[in-house]
Image (cartoon, rainbow, N blue to C red):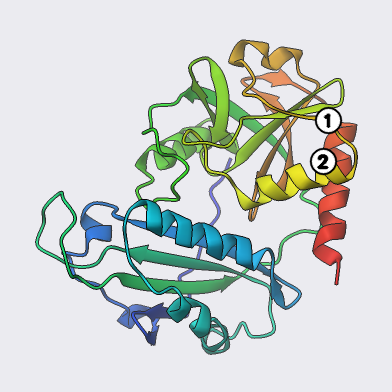
Amino acid sequence: MSQIKYKYPAKVFLNGEILDAGDAKISVFDRGFIFGDGVYEVMARIDGRFFYREAHLARLKWCLGQIHIKADISQLENAIPELLAASGLAEKDCLLYMQVSRGTAPRQHSYPQKIRPTLMMYAWPKTLAGINTTHASVLTIEDYRWSRCDIKSTSLLGNVMANQLAMENDCYETLFIRDGKITEASHCNVFFVKDRIVYTHPRGPLILDGITRQVVLELCKQHGMEVRLEGIPSKEIDKMDEAFLTGTSTQVMAIKEVDGYRFFERQAGPVTQKLQKAFLELKNAP
């Protein structure tokens, strides 16, 4: 699978200023740079509004609390319109990246006291498909990451390595296995379907509780679909009828095959398709 080529954003919000991307600089002693000591969030702007904005911002605040960073994210919220205008995105669909690190201090592992967090944000144009028609091939590996995957940390080396493995094997994603069960993917949540029952790993420290995951679970409820919050044993993948990924930019994406085992040849399963259509209707709702 060829890698997507990305461009740098035009403008960056950094600690209260909106700067040309080339002029946005941080100290080499910023703990986000040295330790990955920070958290981040990504939101999609669709037809003039950020999809589930409040849920994303609430998760950012929760993650900051989990790692004891005291930051006023209203600075980020309030600067969004100005940033979009400066970036030429005031009337366009886009993705917005927000990041808060603990700040700059001499290197030590424990939390330094009385330092100012580094707040950074940028946006880039991105129009999401109505329905994501990609049929993903994925592979599986043992989960070698830490046990606080529920924190949306900027320290993503394990996820980066797993996603690179997927790219090298012409796949879209890598699914993680922990204690014999599928937990999540490198940058998505994962669902399986058997006999029209939807399965996904329960929320907790072993997965990121994705906002799109939460939306899909609510859609299942609205459409009368039975849901079981259970991690699927990796040895039983070939007994499932369907599988799909969820994420902010992934939306709801059908999985065509896992480790070479195929769920379908041309068309995603009926439950996946129904949820894709329901997700589209939700996005289009006034």
Q: Left or right of 131: which side holds 139?
A: left
Q: In which quarter of the image is residue 24?
A: bottom left
Residue 220 is marked as: 2
Q: Do the residues labelled 2 and 1 touch (CB within 8 Å)?
A: yes
**Residue at 36% of width from left, 33% of height from top?**
146
**Residue at 70% of width from left, 66% of height from top?**
127
Query: Which residue, given by chain and number where applicable, does mark 1 sit on?
Result: 226
- How many neighbours does mark 2 have within 10 angstroms: few (below 14), some (14-19), or many (20 or more)? some
Q: Quadrant of residue 31?
A: bottom left
Instruction: Report x, y in % for residue 7.
Output: 49, 68
- How many neighbours does mark 1 have within 10 angstroms: few (below 14), some (14-19), or many (20 or more)? some
The answer to whether any part of residue 170 appears in the image is no
Whether 185 is drawn above or below 39: the answer is above
Give amino acid for label 1: Glu
Instruction: Report x, y in % for residue 164.
Output: 45, 38
SS at mark 1 in the image: loop
Whether 85 is drawn above or below 155: the answer is below
Q: Which of 97 and 232 is in front in this view?
A: 232
Question: Where does the N terminus fall, quadrant-wise?
Answer: top right
Give amino acid for label 2: Cys
Instruction: Report x, y in % for residue 255.
Output: 72, 33
Whether 144 is drawn above or below 173: the answer is above
Whether 181 is drawn above or below 112: the answer is above
SS at mark 2 in the image: helix
Residue 280 is marked as: none
Q: Quadrant of residue 240?
A: top right
